[in-house]
Image (tube, rainbow, N blue to C red):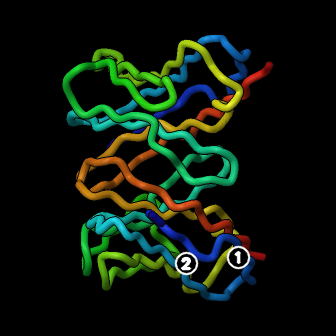
Amino acid sequence: AQSVTQPDIHITVSEGASLELRCNYSYGATPYLFWYVQSPGQGLQLLLKYFSGDTLVQGIKGFEAEFKRSQSSFNLRKPSVHWSDAAEYFCAVGRRGNQFYFGTGTSLTVIP
Amino acid sequence: NAGVTQTPKFQVLKTGQSMTLQCAQDMNHEYMSWYRQDPGMGLRLIHYSVGAGITDQGEVPNGYNVSRSTTEDFPLRLLSAAPSQTSVYFCASGFDSYQPQHFGDGTRLSIL
């Protein structure tokens, strides 16, 4: 069975501060991992993906994520958060057949 | 450049009514999926399709029916709506088995 855990339901950071959102996965094979962002009332937008190779992947909007097999983690980071980054963030693992399994999400609030 | 289009955006039903949520994509993607999003539970896979004429169940298929007669369309049917099906429904498509999914903007469904 596969699962994705996002331990932080809600995070608040100050604008300009660094950000790290945690994601742990449970999957028997080599994982295909993704981070998506959802703004209120919108669909999901892909931030970045990891398939194989370099364990540090770069995404859009200045986000990056690091895959750590030993910790079964795929944490999302951003060096300096902007007010427009306030949204809900979802980690997901992809399975054969384009099946995606999502974590429960982390809601990010950015304070000025 | 429409991408994934879901209709309607909002719908209110009475218990026991039936309805079809429409999903269409113009990217010639083979893979399509339906998810429901509930507070604190992330997105859960309802049904998915790996090509025209081929569908399969996801995590939470009960109470929902799908078919895929064309590459472009993947409707989701509620045969007899129940209050537990009140949710936001997302349709997504992908061009390859492990590639990222593109999401529609969702249908917000309330069942009284």
**Residue named by callout 2:** B21
x and y percent of residue A86 in the render? 68, 32
x and y percent of residue B97 in the render? 23, 54
**Amino acid type, label 1:** Gln
Q: Work out whether disc 2 and disc 1 sit on a shared chain.
A: yes
**Amino acid type, label 2:** Leu
**Residue A3 found in image quarter:** top left
Q: In front here: A85 or B107?
A: A85
Instruction: Check the image and report above or below for A90 versus B29.
Output: above
**Residue drawn at (48%, 77%), measured in percent from left and top?**
B76
Q: Residues within 10 Å of mark 2 (few under 14, many from 20)?
A: many
**Residue drawn at (51%, 78%), measured in percent from left and top?**
B22
- Asked if residue A103 lies left or right of residue A67, the reply is right
What element does badge 1 sit on?
A: strand
**Residue drawn at (40%, 70%), measured in percent from left and top?**
B25
Q: Chain of mark 1?
A: B
x and y percent of residue B32 in the render? 36, 65
What element does badge 2 sit on?
A: strand
**Residue drawn at (53%, 18%), measured in percent from left and top?**
A78
Residues at marks 2 and 1 touching, judged by CB atoms closer than 8 Å: yes
Label 2 to label 1: alpha-carbon separation: 9 Å
**Residue named by callout 1:** B11
Circle number at residue B43: none
x and y percent of residue A95 in the render? 28, 48
Give the quadrant of the C terminus of chain A. Answer: top right
Instruction: Check the image and report above or below for A111 versus B74.
Output: above
Query: Nearer the N terminus, badge 2 or badge 1?
Result: 1
- Asked if residue B36 lies left or right of residue B33, the reply is right
Q: Residues within 10 Å of mark 1 (few under 14, many from 20)?
A: some
Give the quadrant of the N terminus of chain A. Answer: top left
